[in-house]
């Protein structure tokens, strides 16, 4: 996979590409990258890259021509162009998985006032946002996306670590403990020392459900909708909340076909 990043501040994504696991993936030639400085494609001697918007309004917009020339300079056989913007569709683990299957990704990092719409119309495949808040420029957001994407590519990290992560199961992760058994008077939960595999699995699922109910009840609804919540999980939810599940059991996907 090759990442092309079009930016006015290449030093921000560069720090990431040169660090840690990413640096190793680059060394192993699983990942390649190309940082394109949009300013190198400006026309005038001041290297102007922005101007005020037609129709008035606050802030500056990025000029279309330097961006267009920067995009033309990207030599890629099959590229998918992503414009990183707070007004895009949400970036999710699902989208990260989809993008990790592409051969070449091109990220356009803009300043938050944005870029000329004609660049979007002519070049962009996806407008993507990392969340409902505004960053001062797109580089940090693009780097977040690149991090989520590259680690899903085969050979970057082990597949077992990927499978147990938050979102791969649709629930948040269970709490984890390592040595020592007692730290500042706080003990590791007994069940984890028991060696009883089935009880450990049950305890972990119960902790996942309790945490997801507290922090991300929307993920519980989603898991229910997609039939990913087992009956065991539904029963645990009833115990945790002290309420009978609002879902009619007959409508539960796990019941389908089991009716008398
Ligand atoms: Cl993708 N870009 C910027 N500039 N701000 C953001 C964002 C992206 N996602 C959330 N805030």
Image (cartoon, rainbow, N blue to C red):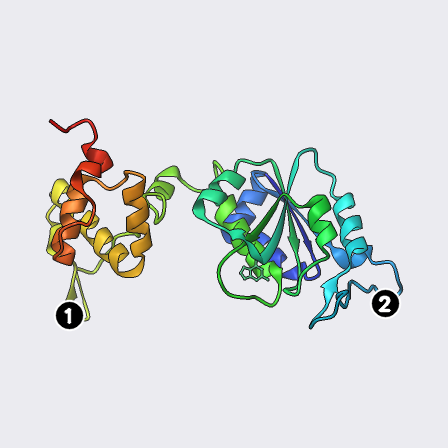
Cα–Cα gap, marks 1 and 2: 63 Å
**Quadrant of the rendered structure where residue 223 is?**
top left
Q: Nearer the viewer, residue 12 or 243?
A: 243
The picture places residue 68, in percent across and down from the top left corner, at 78, 49
Q: Is residue 249 above or below residue 193?
A: above
Residue 219 appears left or right of 156: left
Q: Secondary structure at mark 1?
A: loop
Q: Position of residue 236 (x, y in %)?
A: 15, 49
Q: Residue furthest bottom?
A: 58
> Which residue is most to the right?
45
Q: Earlier in the sequence, mark 1 or mark 2?
A: 2
Quadrant in which the C terminus is drawn:
top left
Q: 215 left or right of 197?
A: right
Badge 2: how crowded within 10 Å, few (<14), some, or many (20+)?
A: few
> What residue is rendered at 31% in x and 57% in y?
216
Give the SS element for disc 2.
loop
Which residue corresponds to mark 2? 46
> Residue at 76% across / 53% down in the picture?
67
Q: Tell me, yes or no, if residue 131 can be seen here.
A: yes
Ligand 1 image position (quadrant): bottom right
Q: Nearer the viewer, residue 58 or 192?
A: 58
| Residue pointed to by mark 1 | 185
Residue 5 locus on image (x, y percent): 66, 51
- Residue at image position (28%, 38%) is 227
Residue 201 appears anywhere in the view: no
Residue at the location (67% across, 61% down)?
Answer: 114
């Amino acid at each position: 996979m090759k990442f092309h990043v079009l930016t006015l501040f290449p030093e921000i994504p560069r720090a990431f590409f040169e660090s840690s696991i990413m640096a190793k993936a680059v060394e192993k030639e699983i990942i390649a990258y190309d940082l394109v400085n949009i300013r190198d494609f400006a026309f005038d001697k001041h290297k102007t890259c922005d101007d005020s918007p037609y129709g008035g309004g606050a802030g500056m917009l990025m000029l279309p021509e330097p961006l267009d020339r920067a995009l033309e300079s990207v030599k890629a056989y099959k590229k998918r162009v992503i414009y990183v913007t707070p007004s895009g569709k949400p970036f999710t683990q699902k989208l990260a998985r989809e993008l990790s299957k592409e051969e070449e990704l091109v990220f356009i990092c803009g300043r938050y006032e944005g870029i000329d719409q004609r660049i979007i119309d002519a070049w962009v495949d996806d407008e993507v946002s990392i969340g409902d808040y505004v960053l001062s420029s797109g580089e940090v957001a693009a780097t977040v996306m690149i991090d989520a994407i590259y680690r899903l590519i085969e050979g970057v990290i082990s597949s077992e670590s990927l499978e147990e992560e938050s979102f791969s199961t649709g629930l948040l992760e269970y709490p984890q403990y390592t040595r020592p058994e007692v730290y500042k008077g706080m003990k590791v939960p007994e069940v984890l020392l028991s060696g009883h595999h089935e009880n450990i699995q049950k305890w972990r699922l119960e902790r996942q459900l309790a945490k997801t109910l507290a922090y991300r009840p929307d993920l519980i609804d989603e898991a229910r909708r997609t039939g990913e919540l087992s009956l065991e999980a539904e029963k645990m939810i009833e115990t945790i909340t002290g309420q009978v599940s609002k879902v009619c059991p007959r409508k539960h996907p796990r019941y389908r076909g089991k009716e008398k």
